[in-house]
Amino acid sequence: MLYQLLYGLHAEISAFNVFRYITFRTILAGLTAFLLCFLAGPVVIGYMREKQIGQYIRRLGPESHQGKAGTPTMGGVLIIVSVIAATLLWIDLKSHYMWIVIFVVTGYCLIGFADDFLKQILKRNRGLRGWTKFSMQVVIAAAAGLLLYCYPEFSSRITIPFVKGFSPDLGPFYVLFAVFVIVGASNAVNLTDGLDGLAIGPVIIAAATYMLFAYVAGHSQIAQYLQINYVAGAGELTILCGALAGAGLGFLWFNAYPAQIFMGDVGSLPLGAALGIIAVITKQEILLVIVGGVFVIEAISVILQVSYFKLTGGRRIFKMAPLHHHFELKGWAESKVIIRFWIIAILFALISFSTLKLR
Ligand code: 57M
């Protein structure tokens, strides 16, 4: 909004010319989102405590988690509101890609809110039925995929990391591919959100990484030089990624160990879906496997554990899945598990940058 207002005045006030720069508006979006989270955090935590919207801890979990019972949750409302507010403030409102991302984020936020509302407020510990949750995620992701596929300027080709000159065109199957990426990313972040700051840390790192990829994808000369798919208009998503990272830092201020608030499904589901849809729009879909490597490892640990458990009639590969619980049960302190997973997330981000040159 301010882009329309302030840049429009640059003829009268030349200093406002700076608002045309995506980099400048990305920094402002990040700072705005951080401040919104940082300032509203104590108010939200106080409200959640007053309304006793505290986390229910299942008996199955590690013993160390029992002390977390009652921790305020659904802090994801704070993150998502901050991201959307900061984005709308600093982005070019004519960016259709931004509206598709906001559609997906809002949809997944509502699914997570419904699940958390049932679990945390109505105390129905199972929340939404698994299939209900999954089918709503698929419908929203399919709608976004279809919107992109029907958009004449959007290509249904996919980018394969480290491979140059081979970008297969999936045609209408691109919609199914987009659904897989968005739903997969959303649920992988959801599974990862099981220790203080464990999910939001890698989300910040992934958002900061896609800040760069969105910028280069939307810059025709740089895209041509790097020989990556040019996506006209994708540059504005840099600002949304900046808001994601900023809001993530603001939330981490309170979610850092020992957490004062959890994000809830209302946070984890839309944050993962946001990374998924951004990866799709910037044509760096498969790269998300590397950028979001921690989320992928956590999800695979669950798939392996459940499959092996069923195949062997009750034996386990890990002490407990997702993988972060395995290390907890091996005796690692929670904070050590968290920081080490963050280190791995940073290493994955660095590897993903190398795909821009190693092709
Ligand atoms: C998402 N939710 C956390 C919090 C957060 C199939 C199976 C692998 C599913 C999986 C599952 O239920 N995942 C749901 C993980 C939960 O966090 C809440 O959920 C929101 C995110 N969706 O925002 O509101 C607990 O995580 C802890 N937590 C923190 N700090 C945070 O900042 O400490 C969360 C955020 C919170 C709190 O204790 O209560 C979760 O873990 O449920 N199930 C599991 O992950 C369970 N694993 C399991 O059953 N493994 C089995 C089989 C099925 C693979 C096995 O290994 O044999 C573990 N999780 C729990 N109990 N809670 C272990 C059992």
Image: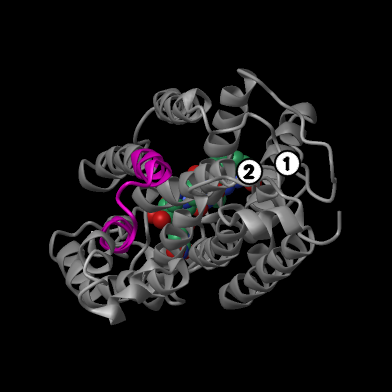
The answer to whether residue 244 is above or below residue 37 is above
**Marks 1 and 2 close (CB-CB < 8 Å):** yes
Residue 99, how many percent across, how many down?
35, 42
Type of residue at label 2? Lys
Tell me if 237 is positioned left or right of 48 in this view. right
Residue 328 picture quarter: bottom right
What residue is shown at x 33% (from left), y 67% (from top)? Answer: 261
Residue 116, how many percent across, how many down?
31, 45
| Mark 2 neighbour class, 10 Å CA radius: few under 14, some 14 to 19, many 20 or more | many
What residue is shown at x 53% (from left), y 68% (from top)? Answer: 201
Residue 195's disc number:
none
| Frontmost residue, 58 versus 345 | 345
Tell me if 222 is positioned left or right of 10 in this view. right
Label 1 sits on residue: 159
The answer to whether residue 255 is above or below residue 144 is below
Q: CA distance from mark 1 to mark 2?
A: 6 Å
Mark count? 2
Circle 1 SS class = loop
The answer to whether residue 317 is above or below residue 34 is above
What residue is shown at x 54% (from left), y 62% (from top)? Answer: 211
Point out the residue furthest to the front here: 11
Residue 283's disc number:
2
Q: Which SS does the magenta portion mostly show? A: helix
Point out the residue furthest to the bottom here: 15
The stretch in magenta equals: 83-104
Protein image colouring? one colour
| Mark 1 neighbour class, 10 Å CA radius: few under 14, some 14 to 19, many 20 or more | many
| Frontmost residue, 324 versus 125 | 324
Residue 176, how many percent across, how many down?
59, 23
The answer to whether residue 4 is above or below residue 254 is above
Type of residue at label 1? Thr
Is residue 100 inside the magenta stretch?
yes
